Amino acid sequence: MSTFGAVFGEAFRLIGALDLALLDIVWLSLRVSLSAVLISTVVALPFGAALAVTRFPGRDALVVTVNALLGLPAVVVGLAIYLLLSRAGPLGTFGILFTPAAMVVAQAVLIFPLIAALARQAVADAWREYAEQMRSLGAGPVASSLALLHDLRFSLVTIVLAAFGRAIAEVGAVMIVGGNIDGVTRVMTTAIALETSKGDLPLALGLGIVLLGIVLLLNVGAHLLKERAQRHHA
Amino acid sequence: MALNRRRVAAAFLATALALGAQAQEKSIVVASTTSTEQSGLFGHILPAFAKSTGIAVRVVALGTGQALDVGRRGDADVVFVHDRAAEDRFVAEGYGVDRRDVMYNDFVLIGPKSDPAKVAGGRDVAAALKAIAAARAPFVSRGDKSGTHAAELRYFKDAGVDPGEGKGSWYRETGSGMGPALNTASSMNAYVLADRGTWLAFRNRGELRIVVEGDTRMFNPYGVILVNPAKHPHVKQAEGRAFMDWIVAAEGQAAIAGYKVGGEQLFFPDAKR
């Protein structure tokens, strides 16, 4: 069996067929991961910037911890969120386990350290250059953070895209907190895991190629927007 | 600034999309096993149930041990599993009520065409496992506390073999679901115990085939249990019971009997009416 021929055949068949169930899965993947990225970004960017421009006891320890959390396995995040959201857990009353909302929470937590750590580094580098100037203008830490984040917005896009990539590619967390329920919490990665389980390797890899294509399209879109905005502001 | 406002609006929109997407339909969560989900059974019978009752069933497919644990934590309304001893314990401990027989399928011993332990064609699963252990032929175990794993350990006990001694050599615990275990066995030409449903639906067989089947011990009964509403008050009792009533009644039983893969019936209804 020429596996790779079959894989590409399967991928094109999937795209050509425009299968409704597949579209639902793709749409859910995008919805969950984009929501997670947006929620995480709103919190992690200011957090990272604050870490860069402020000085307080234990700051270095916090920076190292956030950097270390980059190595956080998705399955561990999934398990922790599962235990929190389980009916027997502290947040069980919300009843959101095995729903897309739980998957958003898990992915948002998973990518928080990534956005925070990279944003902190970017802001810290800029801060070294502009700290003097900001202080002379009388800007406090909040104003400085916001000004630097605004200044760095084009680099931050890359960070956010990296976070999106990690979110949409992970399978360990969404499998546990979503449960891979057909039509409800099945996303691209859990569908790939399921087809692998069934031994339908061409279909699994075909889905993988579709996922890759979607991420690529999104990146192309983000790149074009960024280029246009950059030209506009130049 | 306009750009920023647009971005914030997009953020809110996307968040609303994600969180508001849960339609307010009647639904229950059923924690079940990979064998029922991956064999395609649920895909076949659940649309009929949804059509006759308007209740959507959300299946979380896990190993039996894990499925019961999800029930124990109150994260499912109904469990649908296959490990009688563990099911009875689940009910005895007060986590579930109203266990009912639903159906059975059977286990089959899968092995490579080369058959290094010379067990092909036999009907005695314990004798076959004994021969595999004696030949130190590779054997892939689920190792995940699933119903199939529990059955495998029972057969090894019947064979008087302690598979723990083979760890690191011929006995390979993968700690994975039925499909992944079959994938592993397929790539290392190992023996593996599987439920017939998953085996029939499995595509990546390579050199593997059925070597032992038909032992009465390999009978594999499935039961359905309501998670105890007294312990977990949020359990959707009415909908859960509707599902249990339906699956043991004529319509559900006929739907189970009607599911075939390649012309072969996978599950045999045996609810006591």
Image (tube, rainbow, N blue to C red):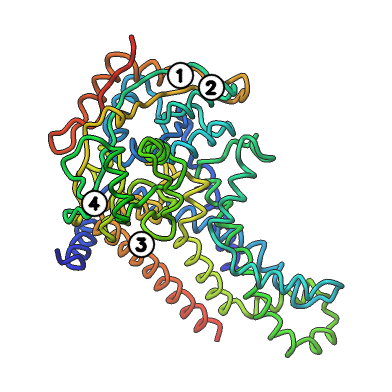
Question: What separation in Å lies between label 4 and label 3 (alpha carbons)?
Answer: 43 Å
Which residue has dot 1 on it? B99
CA distance separating discs 1 and 4: 40 Å
Kindly identify the amino acid type of the residue bearing the numbered disc 4. Answer: Ala
Element assignment for label 4: loop
Which residue position is annotated with label 2?
Answer: B91
Name which residue lies at 62% across and 19% down.
B230
Q: Is residue A80 visible?
A: yes
4 vs 3, front mark? 4
Q: Regarding mark 3 in the picture, which secondary structure is present there?
A: helix
Question: Which residue is at 21% across, 32% downward?
Answer: B214
Counting other residues with Cα less than 10 Å from the Cα at mark 1, is it few (<14), some (14-19), or many (20 or more)? some
Few, some or many C-alpha atoms within 10 Å of disc 3 (few <14, some 14-19, many ≥20)? many
Respond whether the residues carrying marks 2 and 3 are from the same subunit: no
Q: Which mark is residue B117?
A: 4
Q: Earlier in the sequence, mark 1 or mark 4?
A: 1
Q: Are marks 2 and 3 in contact (CB under 8 Å)?
A: no
Q: CA distance from mark 2 to mark 3?
A: 43 Å
Residue flagged by tag 2: what amino acid is it?
A: Val
Determine the chain carrying the residue at label 3: A
Q: What residue does disc 3 label?
A: A211
**Which mark's residue is nearer the viewer, 4 or 2?**
4
Up/down of B244 relative to B202, above or below: above
| Disc 4: CA contacts within 10 A as few (<14), some (14-19) or many (>=20) | many
Q: CA distance from mark 2 to mark 1?
A: 8 Å
